[in-house]
Every structure is written in structure tokens, then in C-alpha cells.
Image (tube, rainbow, N blue to C red):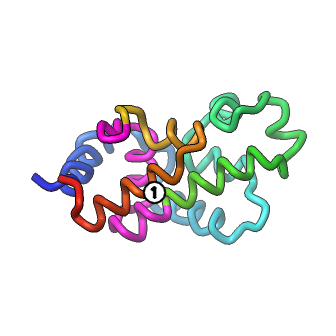
Amino acid sequence: MAQRDLIADDLLLNLGWFMPHEAESLQTLWNELRAQDLLLASTFISFMGLSTAHLATLAGLQETLIARSPSNERLQGFMRQSLEILGLLIDNQDLEPRSAVEWYRRTSLVELGGETAEHYVSQGHSQAVRRYIESVTAGALG
């Protein structure tokens, strides 16, 4: 079975328990996020189904900085890198936003060491995740 099919199967198995928003409102949030110059943490949190505390941890910041310093470089960088990865999944893998978020947050990437894409992006390894997705899209894995 191709790696691309495994990703799709993982998503289908897990979709039932991760539904932060209905599909239409999630699509609206996705469109809003892509159009923003300065990403709003509140929109990102809603789209991703995160808590403020978890976003702070992922961005390597104190929770109070999320509200006090919305233009913080680390915060904006983490959110942009996350959206770039999600964009690859949505555009290249033909995933709906909810499915892309689910895969990004929950699927272990064994070929990269077994953590999730979310973990790797939070550790500054978004390029490794990008290459992984591009390899899957090209059919190089699986």
C-alpha cells in the first residue's frame, strides 16, 4: 500500500474524534488565515483546535505573550510554518482542512523518527516535514 494511501487511511480512522468545527466553518477559518498578513492567534487556535497554553508551548513562548505580543516573531513563525505544511496537505494531497489538521496533529511520521508534523514544526524542522510530504506526493515513499 502506498504511503499516500496510508495517510488517507489514518485520517479516515481518526476523523470521528477530532471535530473542532463543522467543515464549512473550518474552511472559512482556513481562508481567513491564508489572507492575514499578521496571523491572529485566536483564529489559529480555533482552526487548529488548540488551547492558548498549547500554542504557547509549541511556539516556545510563555502563555501571556500570546495575547500581549501577537506580532512576536516566534509565534508568527510557528503559525506560518504550520500553515505552510497544512497548505501542502490541502493543495497537494487533496485533503479538506479538517483532515489536514488531524493528520498534522495526530499522525506519527515514522520515517522522521515517530513524532507528529506538529512536533517537528515546533522544533524548527518544518523543512523535513515539507520534504516528507513532497516525497509522499511524488510517490517516493510507500
Instruction: Point out the stretch of residues depicted in magenta.
Output: 87-112
The amino acid beneath tag 1 is Arg
Tell me the residue at 22%/55% (across/down). Answer: 141
Does 90 sit left or right of 121 as displayed? Answer: left
Circle 1 packing at 10 Å, graded few (<14), some (14-19), many (20+), is some
Q: Which corner quadrant of the image does residue 34 belong to?
A: bottom right
Image point 41% across, 61% down: which residue?
89
As for residue 88 lying within the magenta part, the answer is yes
Rendered view: 61 above or below 76: above
- Position in image of residue 70 (x %, y %): 83, 48
Left or right of residue 16: residue 76 = right
Which residue is outermost to the right?
Answer: 68
Relative depth, front residue between 116 and 17: 116
Residue 59, compared with residue 23, is above or below; it is above
Q: Which residue is mark 1?
A: 130
Quadrant of residue 114 in the image?
Answer: top left
Q: Is residue 108 above or below residue 29?
A: above
Magenta stretch contains residue 57: no
